[in-house]
Image (spheres, rainbow, N blue to C red):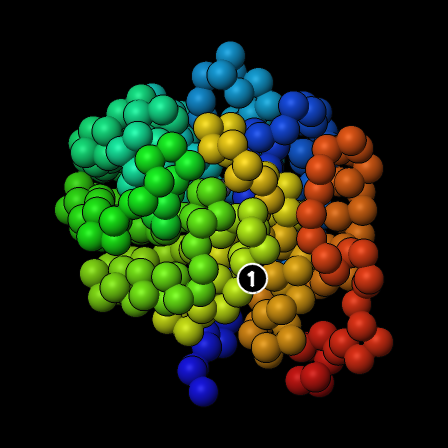
Amino acid sequence: MPSFPANVAIREVGLRDGLQSIPSILPTERKIEWISDAYAAGQREIEVGSFVPARLLPQLADTAELVAYAKTLPGLVVSVLVPNLKGAERAIETNADLLLVPLSASHEHSLANLRKTPDEVVAEVARIRAARDAAGSKTLIEGGIGTAFGCTIQGRVEQSEVLRCMQALLDAGADRVSIADTVGYAGPSAVRELFEKARKIAGERFWCGHFHDTRGLALANVYAALETGVARYDATLAGVGGCPHAPGASGNASSEDLAFMLADMGIETGIDIPALLALRAKVAGWLEGESLHGALWLAGLPKTFAAPAALNA
Ligand code: ZN
């Protein structure tokens, strides 16, 4: 039997990865209610938005307000995505706990999505690190390597290129690195192989796995990654999400289904699943007409389900 981590963090990215890919614009007060309810349900890591120009992503224009609110919740790790130094400066000003800089291991996806080559992103991370240090800020810098298992534009993405980018990000001053299957091309054996190699390079600085459920394998991929000891996963409530530059990349791993699988495995997440399902129902009402995902909400929790806390009592 492989030994799994005893505790796993589910980082909620629905407010960023989810909302950026759908046309509905959720009002700020509803996003605040989402963050508040997610926190009450036990979620302790939330990516609240992205510091990109509002004309590009009007859905995320209120990110600074959301960081300010989220920072009032004790113990919540508040993260934001930033595409460049300008965004990072805003993340540092607003005192976000973590800023994630996306790098696409696919050269062509990188040019289409970020208008930079992977090496230009690495150079930007070095500038962000210098700015962070000059500001005396504690904001952590995470380099998130996307399209790590292939890409809708370029097709194949070599493992060696993903690992080269990872080493380059660490050398440029990233505090954390992570791997994302942006378009849902990964399967468990590829995940196990790449995550094992990534752990050898980055050790504990290998921070997070990010899987899309485009082909139904997001949870299987998390399971494979758990076997390599990685203990943090991005997920979105109701599986909302995708990538505007990767057609067909719909649906992140759904937070509630992932919490359910981990609870079943005896892995502690701190999440109250019924409370998360109640929040899902609320958000589904707000996002009426958008396509949502996940399986647990349809059937509900099994009668035999006991929360880990009850088992330990
Ligand atoms: Zn994603």
Q: Position of residue 53 (x, y in %)?
A: 46, 17
279 to the left or right of 168? right
Residue nearest the observer in this picture, 115 or 91: 115
In the image, what residue occupies the spot 27% across and 25% down?
Answer: 116
Q: Residues within 10 Å of mark 1 (few under 14, many from 20)?
A: many
Residue nearest the observer in this picture, 57 or 175: 57
Placement of 301 over or under 70, stated as above or below: below
Circle 1 sits on which residue?
A: 219
In the image, what residue occupies the spot 44% across and 22% down?
Answer: 52
Q: Position of residue 244 (x, y in %)?
A: 51, 28
Q: Quadrant of residue 141?
A: top left
Give the residue type that dot 1 points to: Leu
In the image, what residue occupies the spot 55% across and 36% down?
Answer: 248
Q: Quadrant of residue 137?
A: top left
Q: Quadrant of the C terminus?
A: bottom right
178 to the left or right of 267? left
Q: Position of residue 189 (x, y in %)?
A: 39, 66
The reply to whether the residue tagged 1 has its Cβ within 8 angstroms of ligand 1 is no
- Disc 1, SS: helix
67 to the left or right of 194? right
In the image, what residue occupies the spot 69% across and 47% down?
Answer: 293
Q: Position of residue 171 (x, y in %)?
A: 15, 46
Residue nearest the observer in this picture, 235 or 37: 235
Q: Quadrant of the N terminus?
A: bottom left
Query: How many numbered discs?
Result: 1
Outermost residue, top side: 55
Placement of 277 over or under 305, stated as above or below: above
Q: Is residue 276 visible?
A: yes
Q: Is residue 39 visible?
A: no
